Each structure stands twice: as C-alpha cells, then as structure tokens.
Image: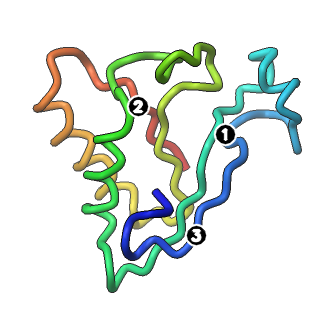
Amino acid sequence: MSRIPGVTGTEVGYANGHTENPTYEEVCTQTTGHAEACRVTYDENRIPLEELLRKYWLVVDPTVKDRQGHDRGNQYRTGIYYTDEADAPIIRKSAEEEQKKQDRPVVTEIEP
C-alpha cells in the first residue's frame, strides 16, 4: 500500500480486538480477537477512497476466512476498519462491487 501514489503513510499493528496493546505472541493465541492490520493514511486529493479500495481487493482473497497466503488463524482474516463513519457507505459499496466478481461470498469484515 505504501507504494501507491497518494498514500502518505502506513503503520502495522493490530485492530478490533478486546485486549489493550496486545503482543504478537498474544495475538497468535487467537484469544485477543485482534486482526493483523495496516493503517493507511492517504491524500484524498491524489487518490480517492474508492480507488484505494480497488487496489486493496487486488492484494487479498476476500473469500477466504481466517487465512491470507500461507498464514492461518483468526488474526489473518481480511478486514477494512475505518475511523470516519462517512467512509462506511463507500466501503460497503466497494465490497458489494467486489462480490459481483467472486464465485464465493466475500467474508471481509467491515467495522469501525
């Protein structure tokens, strides 16, 4: 994501779990509820959210639950986590468009 023109920053960590400041080892126990995540900041004047989402769908398999590549476990689920409620309809519409391209259900989480 960091190589996409208009992306101004990325930061890896964990999202949407129920423990505070989990370690990698804790997340790997699959008891924290966290997903491995990448926060993406971007310049909306250079790349709109819709385009950023189109690029996201190209690098994940949104039809596989709890796995990406060779990595398996609940922490490897696909998800789009937003901080601005105004982004939610755009994200959901993007997921609906992606579903039209898939033979299986899209299982990507969309959560605040």
| Spatial separation of the CA atoms under disc 3 and disc 2 | 23 Å
Which residue is denoted by mark 3 in the rendering?
Answer: 9
Asked if marks 3 and 2 touch (Cβ < 8 Å), the reply is no
Give the residue displayed 39% in from the left and 76% down from the top.
6
Against 20, residue 76 (above or below) is above
Please tell me whether residue 67 is drawn above or below residue 82 in the rendered image.
Answer: above
Q: Earlier in the sequence, mark 3 or mark 1?
A: 3
Q: Which residue is mark 2?
A: 108
Q: 20 or 77, which lies in front? A: 77
Q: In front here: 84 or 79?
A: 79
Label 2 neighbourhood size at 10 Å, few (<14), some (14-19), many (20+)? some
33 vs 44: above or below: above
Crowding at mark 1 (Cα within 10 Å: few <14, some 14-19, many 20+): some
Q: Position of residue 27 (x, y in %)?
A: 79, 26
Residue 110: which quarter of the image?
top left
Tell whether 106 sits left or right of 11: left
Please give left or right for residue 82 compared with residue 53 in the image. Answer: right
Q: Amino acid at mark 3?
A: Gly
